[in-house]
């Protein structure tokens, strides 16, 4: 299955990829998403798994297409984070630099989200140890699966939702309804610029910590109420 999925992903990516163009102006709230929340460790390789039986083989291809588009801007964003699909798993994985994609109930009338990033940070420093992207069963069309995955991966690089941003300006724009595409299959130029800002801050933070005296850390983040991501306690 993995070989067929990867071949299909390349076809989907070539057909649907959003060109990343340099932006002369990236005004937050207009063309660019605000930043905050959690990120992957710089220069890390993220092993991606799909929960077995949650998606059809054709759906998996559309889910994985945004991995290629985010990988394509890895150097430009300064994150040097790359995703690699490893296949299916019977249970969500809680290993270092693991990302599990699965189905689960997300939608409710108050939040209106259909996907959710759930994260865990072992050192309570907003650097993710592992994560899951949860896709509501209501989200079914191929194009919106790609859009939603590109969006949630944006959260994993520190980007926040931007409901006021112009169409086509960022993967973090709002979906107008269930299974209605936002036409964003991968990061825009402004997304690249914003993630670069995020990782400049992360690099400075890591540098400061490396110079400091080691301290004892606890068991990780406690659950918090927020739109995305959802921080989960250690299983």
Image (cartoon, rainbow, N blue to C red):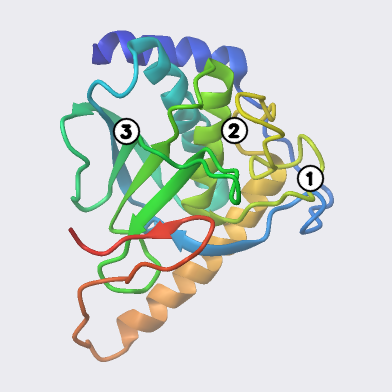
Secondary structure, mark 1, is: loop
Q: In which quarter of the image is the N terminus?
A: top left
| Residue corresponding to mark 2 | 186
Report how far apart the C-alphas of labels 1 and 3 lie in the structure: 28 Å
Looking at the picture, does residue 210 appear above or below residue 194?
A: below
Earlier residue among tags 2 and 1: 1
Work out whether 17 lies above or below 132: above
| Label 2 SS | loop
Residue at the extreme front of the image, as rendered: 109
| Image spot of residue 49 (x, y percent) | 27, 33
Badge 3 marks a residue whose secondary structure is: strand
| Side of 93 relative to 206 (left or right) | left
> Where 6 falls versus 180 (above or below)?
above
Of callouts 3 and 2, the N-terminal one:
3
Return the x and y of residue 88 as percentages of the image width and height: 22, 26
* In this picture, residue 155 sits left or right of residue 40: right
Give the residue at mark 3: 84
Q: Where is residue 80 in the image (x, y as percent from the top left)?
A: 43, 49
Rendered residue at 60%/43% (across/down)? 112
For label 2, the crowd category at 10 Å Cα-Cα, with few meaning under 14, some 14 to 19 and many 20 or more, is many
- Left-right relation of 235 to 162: left
**Residue 57 numbered mark, or none:** none
Q: Which of 178 and 145 is in front in this view?
A: 178
Q: Where is residue 83 in the image (x, y as percent from the top left)?
A: 36, 37
Q: Mark 1 points at which residue?
A: 23
Q: Which of marks 1 and 3 is nearer the N terminus?
A: 1
Instruction: Determine which quarter of the picture holds residue 125.
Output: bottom left
Q: Residues within 10 Å of mark 1 (few under 14, many from 20)?
A: some
Cα gap from disc 3 to disc 2, whole angstroms: 16 Å
């Amino acid at each position: 299955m993995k070989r067929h999925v990867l071949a299909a992903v390349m076809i989907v990516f070539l057909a649907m990829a959003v060109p990343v163009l340099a932006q002369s102006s990236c005004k937050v709230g207009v063309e660019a998403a605000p930043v905050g929340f959690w990120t992957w460790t710089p220069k890390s390789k993220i092993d991606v798994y799909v929960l077995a039986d949650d998606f059809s083989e054709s759906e998996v291809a559309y889910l994985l297409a945004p991995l290629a588009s985010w990988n394509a801007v890895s150097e430009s964003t300064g994150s040097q984070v790359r995703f690699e699909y490893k296949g299916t798993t019977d249970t969500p994985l809680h290993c270092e630099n693991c990302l599990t994609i699965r189905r689960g109930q997300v939608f409710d009338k108050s939040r209106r989200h259909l996907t959710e990033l759930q994260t865990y940070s072992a050192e309570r420093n907003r650097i993710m140890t592992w994560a899951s992207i949860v896709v509501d069963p209501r989200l079914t069309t191929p194009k919106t699966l790609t859009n939603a995955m590109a969006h949630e991966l944006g959260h994993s690089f520190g980007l926040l939702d931007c409901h006021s941003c112009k169409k086509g300006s960022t993967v973090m724009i709002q979906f107008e309804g269930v299974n209605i595409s936002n036409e964003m299959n991968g990061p825009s130029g402004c997304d690249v610029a914003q993630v670069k800002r995020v990782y400049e801050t992360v690099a400075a933070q890591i540098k400061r910590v490396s110079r400091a005296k080691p301290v004892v850390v606890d068991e990780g983040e406690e659950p918090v109420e927020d739109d995305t991501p959802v921080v989960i306690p250690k299983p």
